[in-house]
């Protein structure tokens, strides 16, 4: 079963802080998580501090993502020790758009 919700997506983010912008609720877009990528803590930290670097896991799953009508089909990138996840739509091996997802634990 896929995960659905609403999130505020940012184009070409450099790091996780870029995703923490104040915004209006109407700016959020509907999304569907098509696959969850669970990274090690070190790999997740590396990913969120340099989202412009090419990543093989993004390239491998790029074809699953995109727009499906008004809905954004995306990857959920996380690690098991964090309440933060990043919703990502890759363009090849790099991040095209992304959103921060905070989960209650």
Image (cartoon, helix red, strand yellow):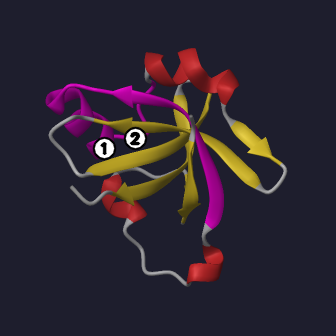
Residue 9 in view:
no
| Residue 48 - label | 1
Q: Is residue 45 left or right of residue 85?
A: left
Q: Are marks 1 and 2 in contact (CB under 8 Å)?
A: yes
Residue 73 pos. (x, y %) = 66, 41
- Kindly give the residue lying farthest to the front in the view shown: 1
Label 1 SS: helix
Q: Is residue 70 above or below residue 32?
A: below
Q: Is residue 4 above or below residue 45?
A: below
Mark 1 vs mark 2, CA separation in Å: 6 Å
| Residue 51 - label | 2
Q: Residue at x 26, y 60 (%)?
A: 104
The residue range painted magenta reads 29-54
Label 2 SS: loop
Q: Is residue 49 above or below residue 21?
A: above
Q: Is residue 60 left or right of residue 57?
A: right
Could you say which quadrant of the image residue 6 lies in? bottom right
Residue 23 pos. (x, y %) = 50, 81
For the residue pair 103 and 42, the one nearer the viewer reads as 103
Magenta span has 60? no
Residue 66 in view:
yes
Mark 2: few/some/many CA within 10 Å (<14, 14-19, 20+): some
Magenta span has 48? yes
């Amino acid at each position: 079963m896929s995960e659905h919700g609403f999130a505020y997506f940012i184009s070409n983010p450099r790091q996780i802080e870029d995703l923490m912008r104040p915004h209006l609720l109407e700016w959020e877009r509907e999304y569907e998580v098509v696959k969850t990528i669970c990274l090690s803590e070190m790999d997740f930290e590396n990913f969120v501090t340099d989202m412009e670097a090419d990543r093989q896991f993004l390239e491998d799953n790029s074809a699953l993502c995109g727009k499906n009508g008004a809905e954004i089909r995306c990857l959920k990138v996380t690690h098991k020790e964090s309440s933060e996840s990043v919703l990502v739509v890759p363009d090849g091996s790099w991040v095209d758009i992304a959103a921060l997802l905070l989960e209650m634990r």
